[in-house]
Image (tube, rainbow, N blue to C red):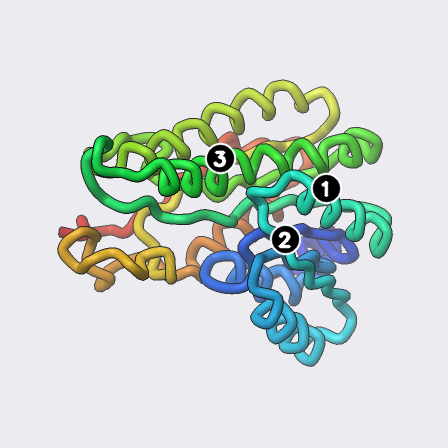
């Protein structure tokens, strides 16, 4: 990476949800070497603290702020943004990454609790985070919001109907808010990975999900994030789809 690219991001502040593992953790590890200060949000405080210590040792010039935050709770999201603003005075980048995989099955077989968990995390959580950071970004006259979506946000898969709905909804609000905020120099972008080898598959029976062999690695999605962030201000990548080369069947 060139010095010009590094310096353009150095000193910025990124808030990452679902940062304790998987894609969120990989993104944090790739942003820290660029000199980006990190607000790390997740429910698992212990893992966040361990990641924060790891990054502090490897990149002492980078500040990290680990915060317990369940994105399903709008009040917790608002509090996390307030704490970030108190610490850093700004948030330049929001990465909505927190997400869950819904149980696979016919719609009538999915419990109300599972429906709520999926929609509240994958869709409403991202909405709460965008709503909380946008006033600050508008005041700053700039910012980037990256919503880590899924290929299921563009193609509906049978037996994943509630998950599909959460991701299609995220796709819709990403595009709508992107148009709302163009005049404020705020980019709102969707990233649509195919199957990624993360803990999101835990709890699903082997026959319910794709084989892990050939899945994308979290680092590969994180590299896509870095690529987008390194674009000049006048370049708007509306969305980016990244999938495994071969079908996972």
Name the disc covering residue 123, or none: 3
Report the front residue among 107 and 159. Answer: 107
From the image, tell me which residue sits under label 1: 78
Considering the numbered disc 2 on the image, is that residue within a helix, a strand or a loop? loop
Report the front residue among 73 and 179. Answer: 73
Considering the numbered disc 3 on the image, is that residue within a helix, a strand or a loop? helix
Considering the numbered disc 1 on the image, is that residue within a helix, a strand or a loop? helix
Where does the image place residue 191, in percent across and percent down from the top left? 46, 41
Q: Given the current orientation, which residue lies at the most extreme bottom position?
A: 57
Q: Residue at x 68, y 36 (%)?
A: 233
Badge 1: few (under 14), some or many (20 or more) residues near its Cα, within 10 Å?
A: some
Q: How many marks?
A: 3
Q: Residue at x 27, y 30 (%)?
A: 156
From the image, tell me which residue sits under label 2: 69
Q: Is residue 166 above or below residue 225?
A: above
Question: Answer yes or no: do the residues labelled 1 and 3 have beta carbons within 8 Å?
Answer: no
With 247 as the anchor, is 241 left or right in this view?
right
Q: Of the residues under marks 2 and 1, which one precedes in the sequence? A: 2
Q: Quadrant of residue 143?
A: top right
Where does the image place residue 196, in percent across and percent down from the top left? 34, 55
With 133 as the anchor, is 238 left or right in this view?
left
Whole-Å distance between the Cαs marked 2 and 3? Answer: 16 Å
Where does the image place residue 145, in percent across and percent down from the top left? 62, 38
Whole-Å distance between the Cαs marked 1 and 3? Answer: 16 Å
Where does the image place residue 190, in percent across and percent down from the top left? 49, 36
Q: Is residue 193 above or below residue 19?
A: above
């Amino acid at each position: 990476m060139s010095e010009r690219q590094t310096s353009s991001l150095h000193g910025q502040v990124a808030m990452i949800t679902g940062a304790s593992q998987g894609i969120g953790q990989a993104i944090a590890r790739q942003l820290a070497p660029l000199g980006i200060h990190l607000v790390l949000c997740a429910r698992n405080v212990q893992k966040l603290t361990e990641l924060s210590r790891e990054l502090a040792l490897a990149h002492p010039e980078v500040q990290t702020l680990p915060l317990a935050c369940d994105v399903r709770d709008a009040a917790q999201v608002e509090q996390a943004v307030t704490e970030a603003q108190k610490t850093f005075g700004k948030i330049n980048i929001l990465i909505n990454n927190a997400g869950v995989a819904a149980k696979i099955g016919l719609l009538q077989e999915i419990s109300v609790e599972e429906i709520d968990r999926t929609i509240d995390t994958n869709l409403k959580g991202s909405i709460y985070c965008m709503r909380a950071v946008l006033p600050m970004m508008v005041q700053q006259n700039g910012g980037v919001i990256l919503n880590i979506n899924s290929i299921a946000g563009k193609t509906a898969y049978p037996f994943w109907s509630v998950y599909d709905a959460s991701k299609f909804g995220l796709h819709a609000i990403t595009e709508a808010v992107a148009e709302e905020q163009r005049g404020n120099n705020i980019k709102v972008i969707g990233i649509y990975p195919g199957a990624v080898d993360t803990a999101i598959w835990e709890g699903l029976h082997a026959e319910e999900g794709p084989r892990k062999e050939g899945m994308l690695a979290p680092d590969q999605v994180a590299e896509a994030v870095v690529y987008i962030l390194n674009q000049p201000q006048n370049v708007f990548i509306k969305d980016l789809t990244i999938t495994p080369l071969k079908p996972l069947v």
